[in-house]
Amino acid sequence: MIDSGLRDRAGRHITLRPVDDDNWRDVADVAPRDDQRAWVPALAARYLVLTMRSDGWTSLAVYADETVVGHAMWGVDDDGSRWIGGMVIAADEQDRGVGRATVRTLADWLAAQDGGSVVRLSYHPDNAPAARLYTSLGFAPTGAVEDDELVVELTS
């Protein structure tokens, strides 16, 4: 379990846990808001399949107290940088601070790996809410673009 002690606006404890036999169905069923489907899949199941079929990514279940409310995945690039990818927060859990707590928790954990690592993520330039969130958390543009997404890295 990855736990930074952060809570959402309702006071629920946000933790990141391995996807396992007990929670994978709940994680797979996580669906974003309809207006986000231009940037994320309709269900987190797509990300679970990606992590099962790839050596580069690891899926995590996002919990608010003891309820699955999202999915996030992480990976390590060839240059040693850590990446956050495939984050989906359930539509009915949005705007409660769950996404912010998830990114902060995972970014802090990844940055501490192997004595300190660069943490990156990417988002579509039209995804203004993601841009605001990541900027507010200290991510800054690298100038790189991957798969039509802007690459940012944690600077603070």
Image (cartoon, helix red, strand yellow):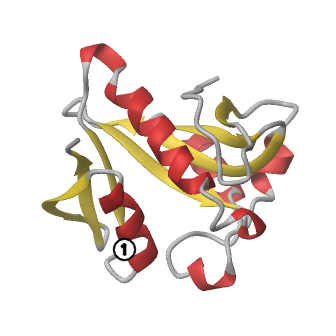
Q: Position of residue 61 (x, y in %)?
A: 69, 40
- In the picture, the quarter occupied by the N terminus is top right
Q: Using a 10 Å C-alpha cutoff, classify the residue at mark 1 as few (fewer than 14 neighbours), some (14 to 19) or many (20 or more).
A: some
Q: In percent of the image, x 68 and y 29: which residue is there?
A: 18
Instruction: Identify whether 40 is placed above or below 115.
Output: below
Q: In percent of the image, x 69 and y 52: which residue is there?
A: 70
- In the picture, the quarter occupied by the C terminus is top left
Quarter-wise, where is residue 107 in the image?
top left
Q: In this figure, which residue is indicated by the disc labeled 1?
A: 124
Q: Position of residue 59 (x, y in %)?
A: 60, 39
- Left or right position of 150 against 136: left
Q: Position of residue 27 (x, y in %)?
A: 76, 49
Q: Position of residue 77 (x, y in %)?
A: 29, 37
Instruction: Identify whether 112 is placed above or below 21.
Output: above
Q: Secondary structure at mark 1?
A: loop
* Near-viewer residue (70 or 54): 70
* Near-viewer residue (24 or 121): 121
Amino acid under label 1?
Answer: His
Q: Residue furthest left?
A: 143
- Left or right position of 73 against 33: left
- Left or right position of 55 against 24: left
- Left or right position of 125 against 71: left
Instruction: Identify whether 92 is placed above or below 36.
Output: above
Q: In percent of the image, x 23 and y 35: which residue is there?
A: 118
Instruction: Identify whether 150 is placed above or below 46.
Output: below
